[in-house]
Image (spheres, grey):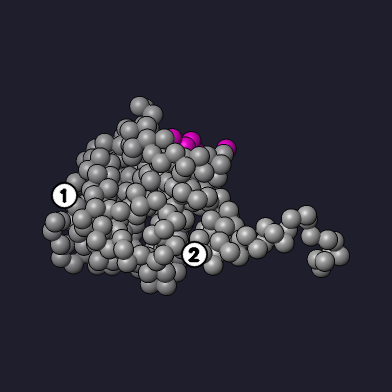
Amino acid sequence: MSEAGTMPAPGYADRLEEMVQRRIAGHPLEQILGWAEFCGLRVPVAPGVFVPRRRTELLATHAVQLLAAMTDSTAGAGQLAKTASTVVELCCGSGAVTLAIAAQTAASPTLFAVDFQPEAVERARLSLDGVATVLAGDLFSPLPGELPGRVDMVVANAPYIPTAQLPTLPHEARDYEPMLTLDGGSDGLDVLRRIISAAPPWLRPGGYLLLECSRQQAQTVRHILTLHGFTPEIVRRKATDATIAVGRRELAAADAPGRAASLGTAESLGTGESLGTVEPLGTAASPE
């Protein structure tokens, strides 16, 4: 009997045993439960859909901090001055990052989430019902035709694991998550290169592109961002071994009487714990 003195529902013991056996077999706990915790939220997940990772919380929290900084810093300057921002998440999977941005952003941004995997689109539409527009397609291709030049921020946790490293992944990922959500090509950056090269026409001047990557890839991603006209920075959170590359699209001369909303430092945008640490630029590596 439960603590409330009620009997378990019929079939409860069988269901529990099934869950235990699936876990013993190596199924991800989140897929067994049907949800994953992300930024304090319960995000629905299912077999065949990428399971949100704790490290990706940096992507969401940094996006929220930047959106707040953009609003605060432009209120008096007239740059990017809007009551609400437009944010696009690519390779959205379950929609965890978009859900977290919606929950933590006061200005009610207009949100779009995109994935080309049918299972992910179905799950994202469940997670983001009434929160965001979920679109099926490849990267920017399904976005509305009026969005180019009007997007304030693009975020993506795209596949970035080098193909040769896939056999070294934990059993849960190798056997129970789609390889297309993990495999980033020979150096892990195939999809990130596509996103970076395609993003500038969609972003308004002063807008941001945020990409999760590995620490080893960060210098190369930063260099690619520079090649495509972005001002880059790398943000790290050691506690979860998280790394994101952040690129700001430069303001046109006519739009820039002063600086755009700046990436700044962890101290100027919020606490180091929520934002992570902004690393110095140093010398960028060349893309392979």
The span shown in magenta is 130-135
| Alpha carbon separation for disc pair 1 and 2 | 42 Å
Q: Quadrant of the C terminus?
A: bottom left
In which image quadrant can residue 53 be found?
A: bottom left
Q: Nearer the viewer, residue 246 or 18?
A: 18
Q: Earlier in the sequence, mark 1 or mark 2?
A: 2
- Residue 32 in view of the camera: yes
Taking depth in this image into account, of 62 and 58 the one nearest to the observer is 58
The answer to which of 208 and 51 lies nearer the viewer is: 51
**Kind of residue at badge 1:** Leu
Q: Is residue 229 magenta?
A: no
264 displayed left or right of 24: left
Amino acid type of the residue that numbered disc 2 sits on in the rendered structure: Gly
**135 above or below 171?**
above
Q: Position of residue 250 (x, y in %)?
A: 24, 46
**Residue ranking furthest to the top:** 145
Residue drawn 35% across the image and 65% down it: 169
Q: Which residue is mark 1?
A: 227
Quarter occupied by residue 18 = bottom right
Q: Which residue bears the numbered disc 2?
A: 26
